[in-house]
């Protein structure tokens, strides 16, 4: 069974294919260079199949697009929110749905929690993408 750290690194590697997007598989202390996608620790449901046959993880990928009051940040979020294309968060994450054989499957199920997020003295325009992961 794949470890959480390895799965977070795999999701981050898939996201790293988006030109101009910085990616972290660990939560940073500061948001130094937006746009930044952060793969957060998951929630986990154990024993979804008999005899420890399946665990379901749900990862949150929080995308910091830029300062909340920036039109450029809104334009970036629009590009990341599309379901296909070179800037699509969904397309990038799903580009390798088994993370090189590490997991059974993954898919991006939704984008939510769009709005300002305060970090230090600044407020960033953010969106959260939910990634459902099945591990055997």
Image (cartoon, rainbow, N blue to C red):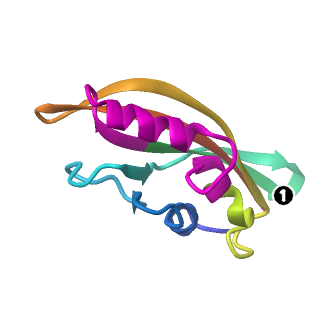
Residue 82 counted in the magenta span? yes
Q: Residue furthest left?
A: 121
From the top left corner, tell me how far across and down residue 122 is, in percent: 16, 33
Identify the residue position indicated by label 1 in the image: 53
From the top left corner, tell me how far across and down residue 58 is, in percent: 62, 44
Residue 4 vs 55, above or below: the answer is below
Q: Quadrant of residue 23?
A: bottom left
From the top left corner, tell me how far across and down residue 74 is, in percent: 40, 31
As drawn, is 51 to the left or to the right of 31? right
Residue 136 vs 61, above or below: the answer is below
From the top left corner, tell me how far across and down residue 54 is, in percent: 80, 54
Residue shown at 46% from the left, 63% from the top? 19
| Quadrant location, the C terminus | bottom right
As drawn, is 62 to the left or to the right of 98? left
Q: Quadrant of residue 99?
A: bottom right
Please name whichever residue, 12 or 78, is drawn nearer the observer in this view of the structure: 78
Residue shown at 53% from the left, 69% from the top? 13
Which residues are the magenta region?
63-92
Q: Residue furthest bottom?
A: 100
Residue shown at 30% from the left, 29% from the top? 117
As drawn, is 91 to the left or to the right of 87? right
As drawn, is 35 to the left or to the right of 109? left
Which element type, helix, strand or loop, lies under badge 1? loop
Please name whichever residue, 122 or 102, is drawn nearer the observer in this view of the structure: 122
């Amino acid at each position: 069974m794949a470890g959480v750290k390895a799965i977070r690194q795999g999701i981050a590697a898939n996201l790293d294919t988006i030109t101009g997007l910085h990616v972290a598989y660990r939560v940073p202390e500061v948001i130094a260079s937006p746009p930044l996608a952060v793969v957060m620790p998951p929630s986990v449901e154990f024993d979804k199949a008999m005899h420890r046959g399946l665990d379901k993880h749900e990862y949150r990928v929080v995308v910091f697009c830029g300062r909340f009051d920036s039109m450029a940040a809104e334009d970036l979020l629009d590009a990341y929110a599309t379901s296909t294309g070179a800037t699509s968060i969904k397309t990038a994450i799903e580009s390798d749905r088994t993370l090189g054989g590490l997991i059974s499957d993954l898919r991006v199920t939704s984008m939510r929690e769009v709005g300002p997020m305060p970090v230090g003295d600044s407020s960033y325009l953010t969106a959260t993408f939910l990634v459902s992961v099945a591990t055997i």
